[in-house]
Image: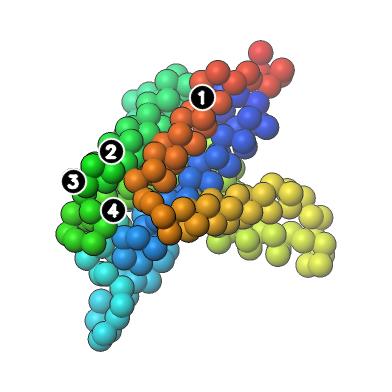
Amino acid sequence: MAIASPVSQRQTEAALLLLTFTTGLIDAVSVLALGHVFVANMTGNVVFLGFWFALRTVVDLTAAVVAFACFLLGAIVGGRLVRHLGGNVRVWIATALGVEIILLVVLAILCGAGVLRYDDDTKLVVIAGLATAFGIQHSTARQFGIQELTTTVLTSTIVGIGVDSKLAGGSGARQRLRIAVVATMCVGALVGATLTRFTVAPILALGAVVVTVSAALFWFGKPSPEKT
């Protein structure tokens, strides 16, 4: 059963779109700087795991395993948070996104200081931390029951654009939101890919800033008039 958002529908969608932007931003870093691995979109990693028995693949299978396992761990943590704190929705969201923010900030600091690198085995720590963060994010976002805004998966959203389009005989309902979701993740990936040419650690910090803005919308936002 979906949890009612503590803020209006428009603010909820805005906050979740910010998280979607962060997904594109950080996945661009993981793919381009950490060895062709996804830390938020697990479908790609599952496909990569299928390459395990193939010869001469260019995919870092160890990284894919770490990302998959830690994303699942993050989802478990997110599930426990909602079950323990879901009675106070604002506190639950602030806690869940707060954990994600802390992970992103710590990783940004460690990467910026050279403690963690992108070209040796320490990158697995970066991958593990990022995947855990996005496991928490996904398990939190999905609680609102907005199919298009799980913040880390676009397949069903893209299918909805096609199936419900007027070309397919549908009503075209919710198309604006769905297109916005796809465009938001694409823009996040564009920003991440562009910045990765010059730097990495500050991109993780930028992700933390965006998640903080999303958390602030959930914490300070006003509920819909009918909820008051």
Q: Are marks 4 and 1 in contact (CB under 8 Å)?
A: no
4 vs 103, left or right, is right
In the structure shown, which secondary structural element does the residue marked by tag 3 occupy?
Answer: loop
How far is disc 2 from disc 1 in space, using C-alphas? Answer: 22 Å
Query: Mark 1 = which residue?
Result: 216
Instruction: Give the amino acid at mark 4.
Output: Ile
Instruction: Give the amino acid at mark 2.
Output: Ile
Label 2 CA crowd tier, 10 Å (few <14, some 14–19, many 20+): some
Query: Mark 2 = which residue?
Result: 109
In the structure shown, which secondary structural element does the residue marked by tag 2 occupy?
Answer: helix
Label 3 CA crowd tier, 10 Å (few <14, some 14–19, many 20+): few
How far is disc 2 from disc 4 in space, using C-alphas? Answer: 15 Å
Q: Are marks 3 and 2 in contact (CB under 8 Å)?
A: no
Q: Nearer the viewer, mark 2 or mark 4?
A: 2
Residue 157 found in image quarter: bottom right
Q: Earlier in the sequence, mark 3 or mark 2?
A: 2
Q: Nearer the viewer, mark 2 or mark 1?
A: 2
Q: Earlier in the sequence, mark 2 or mark 4?
A: 2
In the structure shown, which secondary structural element does the residue marked by tag 4 occupy?
Answer: helix
Q: Earlier in the sequence, mark 2 or mark 1?
A: 2
Please state the horizontal and vertical placement of residue 57, each as a whole percent of the image. 29, 81
Instruction: Give the amino acid at mark 1.
Output: Ala
User: In the picture, which quadrant includes the C terminus?
Assistant: top right
Q: In the displayed structure, would residue 90 be above or below residue 44?
A: above
Please state the horizontal and vertical placement of residue 113, each as a whole percent of the image. 23, 42
Q: Which mark is residue 115?
A: 3
Q: Earlier in the sequence, mark 1 or mark 3?
A: 3
Count how many numbered circles sit on residues in the image: 4
Q: Are marks 2 and 1 in contact (CB under 8 Å)?
A: no
Q: Nearer the viewer, mark 3 or mark 4?
A: 3
Q: Which mark is residue 127?
A: 4
Please state the horizontal and vertical placement of residue 146, each as a whole percent of the image. 59, 42
